[in-house]
């Protein structure tokens, strides 16, 4: 199945010329190439990548750091406290 893409100059979206897979960022595009070969869709899924089924672009898994996890927990606690009044 071939998908038409509307990639424009200045867009962060990338399409691999070898496998024709589209990525949500240049970093994702670079990461999908291993030793000059493209990762397959199955490999991307196993590594936690997400496919935007509507637009057809792959996104890398979000890397959470310890600080971000603490901030998220603090944010949830604040929202819960504010909801109580």
Image: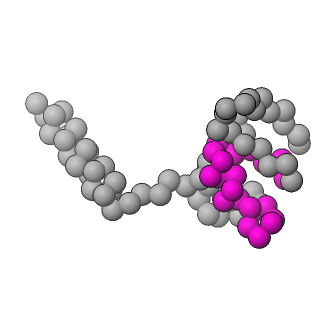
Residue at the outermost front position = 10
User: Does residue 75 lie above or below 11 as drawn?
Assistant: below
- Outermost residue on the bottom side: it is 35
* Quarter of image, res 15: top right
* Quadrant of the frame with the C terminus: top left
At x 89%, y 42%, the residue is 1
Q: Residue at x 84, y 36 (%)?
A: 3
Horizontal relation, residue 70 to residue 46: left or right: left
Q: Position of residue 57 (x, y in %)?
A: 69, 42
* Residue at screen point 38% across, 60% down: 65
Report the residue at 20% width, 46% height from top: 77
Residue segment shown in magenta:
19-39
Which residue is farthest left? 85
Where residue 46 appears, as percent x and y from the top left, is 64, 64
Structure colour scheme: one colour
- In this rendering, does residue 73 appear at all? yes
Number of marks drawn: 0
Residue toward you, 53 or 59: 59
Residue 51 % position (x, y)? 66, 46
Check the image and report above or below for 31 versus 57: below
Please indicate, yes or no, whether residue 54 appears anywhere in the rendered image. no
Note whether 57 is above or below 65 in the view shown: above
> Residue 20 magenta-drawn?
yes
Q: Residue furthest right?
A: 1
Instruction: Let me know if residue 37 is in the magenta part.
Output: yes
In percent of width and height, residue 75 lies at 25, 44
Q: Is residue 57 left or right of residue 73?
A: right
């Amino acid at each position: 199945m071939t998908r038409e893409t509307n990639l424009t100059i200045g867009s962060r979206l990338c399409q691999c010329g070898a496998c024709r897979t589209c990525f949500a960022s240049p970093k994702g595009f670079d990461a999908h190439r291993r030793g000059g070969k493209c990762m397959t869709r199955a490999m991307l899924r196993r590594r936690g990548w997400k496919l935007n089924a509507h637009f057809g672009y792959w996104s890398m898994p979000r890397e959470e750091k310890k600080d971000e996890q603490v901030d998220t927990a603090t944010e949830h606690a604040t929202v819960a406290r504010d909801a109580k009044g």
